[in-house]
Amino acid sequence: MTPPPLPRTLQVEVTAACNLRCRMCLVRYRPPLDRAMASLSFEAFRDVVDAVPDVEQVTLQGLGEPLLAPDLFRMIEHASARGIRVGFNTNATLLTRATAERLVSAGLDWLCVSLDGATAATYESIRDGAKLAKVEANVRGLVAVMRARGAVRPRLSLVFVAMRRNVAELPGVVRLADAWGVPTVRVQNLSHSFSDTDPAGAYREIRDYAAREALWPGAEPRAGSPTDATATRAFAAARAAAAETGVTLRLPSLEEAPAARMPGAPGCDWPWGSAYVRHDGRVQPCCMLMGGDRAILGDVRAESFAAVWRGPAYEAFRAALTTGAPPTVCRGCSMYRGIF
């Protein structure tokens, strides 16, 4: 099999450190990481990006909070100066007015703000360590900076991770987006079931959480939790709120589509067009799988990105994706299953 051309998009984990302990994130179930030790340097970032001459888009995020990355603004400026679209997801707790000014000045193309509840009680129970009032003030501050400058970038979105514990508040999140001046709400399911892992192993806690909270088919909700009908009603009410306010709404599927791909076609095309580079230089096929011990395809500290991209580990991973027996780590992935 001939390796594909170098990718046009990259995702780079600029830091693995985070200031929150969100319930659906692997960070919660691992020891805290030091910001200085767990962040990518500007020089390492530049080397990765410049090794992919035709890259058009770079996402600056992984398991950590990008605003903790010491060299974040230099990274944005470097990518923007090359004409590369660059953006990231943030919990927005560190999005001060001064930070907002710097992001706009640096040329950030898009910014997604995580918001998993319309009430402080729900949001703060999920995003452990965050305060909804602070996030609201910070987002409104960024919107004010953009309006004062007449800036159309970064393009802003709220991102809502839909779970049994919060899905009923989705219509309220759409209305918050309208009130805060954010034009888009993107809703996603949990990223992975972790069904490929040992039920009693290192991923036990996040695997159990996904089993209790996921909206996808086959999940087992805890006693007294909302039913699947609750999610269906919440999605319908969110569509109505979006139509009323003019907010653009993206919803995931609640049902897996039947497998319908041509023989030999990949079940997921991510490893042909993009790559995920961790803060420590290890390369994985995507961000969806979580965990630094899963599907490691190479290390840019030891060889060039091109050598990793064209290497035997990547080729074997791609080959497996063209069959009915994909890599084990892909089988619980929401993207692979068409429900992200």
Image (spheres, grey):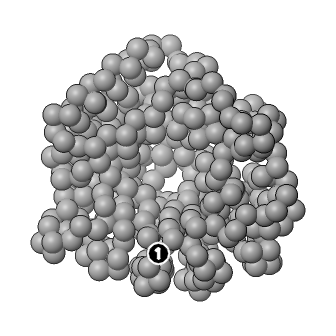
Q: Residues within 10 Å of mark 1 (few under 14, many from 20)?
A: many
Instruction: Indicate whether 98 appears above or below 228.
Output: below
Instruction: Indicate whether 231 appears above or below 209.
Output: above
| Label 1 element class | loop
| Residue 234 visible | yes
Report the front residue among 92 and 151: 151
State which quadrant residue 195 falls in. Answer: top right
The residue that appears at 50% across and 13% down in the rendered structure is 223
Name, please, the residue furthest toward the left.
148
Percent of width and height locating residue 59: 50, 64
State which quadrant residue 327 falls in. Answer: top right
State which quadrant residue 76 falls in. Answer: bottom left
Report the front residue among 299 and 205: 299
The residue that appears at 42% across and 46% down in the rendered structure is 128
Task: Answer with left or right where residue 227 lies relative to residue 239.
Answer: right
Percent of width and height locating residue 187: 40, 39
Amino acid of disc 1: Ile
Name, please, the residue furthest toward the front.
262
Q: Which residue is mark 1?
A: 84
Task: Answer with left or right where residue 180 lies relative to residue 189.
Answer: left
The residue that appears at 24% across and 50% down in the rendered structure is 183
| Residue 290 visible | no
Percent of width and height locating residue 228: 45, 17
The residue that appears at 16% across and 39% down in the rendered structure is 245
Instruction: Indicate whether 286 appears above or below 202.
Output: below
Percent of width and height locating residue 88: 44, 62
